[in-house]
Image (spheres, helix red, strand yellow):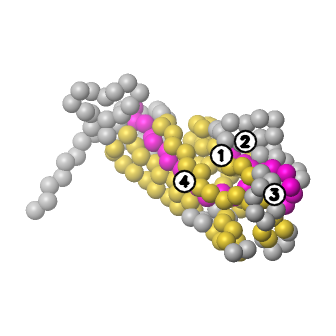
Amino acid sequence: MSSQLRVDSIVPVNGVPTGGGGGIIQIVQNTNSSTSVISNTSTWIDTTLSATITPTSANSKIFVMICQGVGAVSPNTGVSGGGLRILRNSTVIYTPGEDGNGPFGDSYVDATAASATDGTITLRNVRFHRINIQVLDSPSTTSTVTYKTQGKPYITGNSEFFWINRLLANNDIHPVVSYITLMEVSG
């Protein structure tokens, strides 16, 4: 025979620390491997990585964890890159640092990167990695909320690209799986 313990909130013996939470109530994870290319725009574009959660309490916090595959690509000898931001519904809860060219805190390439080809153009500068972002959010609601990422290239024009969920290996482009994990933490 198995037992179940059901509670509305989990609070440590000494109380909840300032700015923290008591325990994990639920976890939601979603994956996505849809590839896209963001180029020549100063507007943030949806990357199709998203997940939805319904908090059980308005006092709960949502711990958002992003692990997204990206590529910063330039067919020129200059620099390229891009960044990701996180939204709760339409509210931005995280954005990377930017300068006059665009976001630079998450993904960046320079002229020292290796050359390759994507089948249509020669890519002189290529960098691929995963961007990992963690944010503790306070949605203050028991309504369903959706968290998603948006991307934007570092430089517009000049054929620089910010690739989403794409990996270049042996001159072939492969989709990679990206993850978003949402954990409701009792307040």
What residue is pinned by disc 2? 103
In contact (CB < 8 Å): disc 1 and disc 2: yes
- What residue range appears in magenta? 59-83
Task: Pick the quarter of the image with the C terminus.
Answer: top left
Q: On the image, which quarter does residue 11 sit in?
A: top left
What residue is pinned by disc 4? 67
Left or right: 115 with respect to 12? right
User: How far is mark 1 from mark 4, CA to CA?
Assistant: 12 Å
What residue is pinned by disc 3? 74
Measured as percent of width and height from the top left, residue 147 is found at 55, 47
User: How far is mark 2 from mark 3, CA to CA?
Assistant: 16 Å
In contact (CB < 8 Å): disc 1 and disc 4: no
Regarding residue 144, the answer to whether it shows in the image is no
Q: Residues within 10 Å of mark 2 (few under 14, many from 20)?
A: many
Measured as percent of width and height from the top left, residue 146 is found at 54, 47
Regarding residue 70, the answer to whether it shows in the image is yes
User: How far is mark 1 from mark 3, CA to CA?
Assistant: 16 Å
Q: Residues within 10 Å of mark 4 (few under 14, many from 20)?
A: some
Main SS, magenta region, reads: strand
Whichever of callouts 2 and 3 sits on the residue coming sooner in the sequence is 3
Left or right: 185 with respect to 158? left
Measured as percent of width and height from the top left, residue 51 is found at 52, 53
At x 75%, y 58%, the residue is 113
Q: Residue 106's mark?
A: 1
> Within the magenta stretch, is there residue 170?
no
Whichever of callouts 1 and 3 sits on the residue coming sooner in the sequence is 3
